[in-house]
Image (cartoon, rainbow, N blue to C red):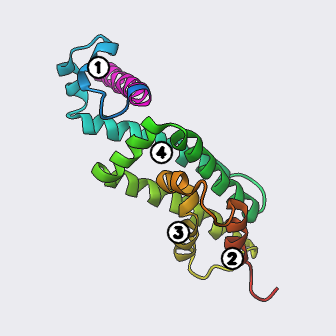
Amino acid sequence: MTMVADNNEAGTRARILVVAERLFREIGYQKTTVADIAKVLRMSPANVYRFFDSKKAIHEGVARGLMGEVEDAAQAIASGPGPAADRLRELMTTIHRMNSERYVGNSKLHEMVEIAMQESWQVCVAHMEQITGTIAEVIASGAASGEFEAPDVPLAAMCACTAMMRFFHPQMIAQCVDKPGPSIDQMIDFILAGLAPKNK
């Protein structure tokens, strides 16, 4: 009986997040109320609060879901076949593309990211740690095969992420879109050159 209740509860939580994300995209996070979410779901606001104790908690759930999709895509590339340099390039390009498509052209979702950075910093920190860890995985496999030289893999991964911030961070992608600077391929070439074995 508990298992059925748990499944129903998980299903209801998931439905709340789907509706919340849709409303955040359509009318914006600030303008969306818990009552709006409840109305679409044909629930009472009190019922929504049984699953999420605040609008901030719903926002964190939506942000986690969006970030989780990027993390899953990055992990799939990291775990795939092929040379580490090719995987690293594809992984970095994919993160940039996903964040550009989702947030930069959509002012409502962009607003949600800004609020996440102000109010739910821990969700953002966990995401950055996950992405850095996935990049470290690729660098470690390249170091093991002799393709890369990285005596300190965690440091190399943090340096690579910092170098890519302009292409990863939704706010920076939006701000830098018309600014001069290296292209994403030039930046990845620079990172790969830094990881290349020095005795070649």
Residue at 51% x, 55% y is: 175
Q: Nearer the viewer, residue 23 or 60?
A: 23
Label 2, label 4: how many angstroms apart (C-alpha)? 27 Å
Q: Residue furthest top?
A: 42
| 9 to 168, vertically: above or below | above
Q: Residue furthest right?
A: 200
Is 1 left, or right, of 131 in this rendering? left
- The disc at residue 67 is 4
List the residue tagged with mark 2.
195
Q: Tag 2: Cα neighbours inside 10 Å, few (<14), some, or many (≥20)?
A: many
Q: Earlier in the sequence, mark 3 or mark 2?
A: 3
List the residue tagged with mark 3.
162
Q: Disc 4 marks which amino acid?
A: Met
Q: Check if residue 7 falls in the magenta segment.
A: yes
Label 3, label 1: how many angstroms apart (C-alpha)? 39 Å
Label 4, label 1: how many angstroms apart (C-alpha)? 24 Å
Residues at discs 2 and 1 in contact (Cβ within 8 Å): no
Label 1, secondary structure: give it.
helix
| 87 to 17, vertically: above or below | below
Residue at 78% x, 57% y is: 82
Label 4, secondary structure: give it.
helix
List the residue tagged with mark 1.
36
Q: Tag 4: Cα neighbours inside 10 Å, few (<14), some, or many (≥20)?
A: many
Q: Disc 3 marks which amino acid?
A: Thr
Q: Earlier in the sequence, mark 4 or mark 3?
A: 4
Region of the chain picked out in magenta, as a range: 1-25
| 101 to 192, vertically: above or below | above
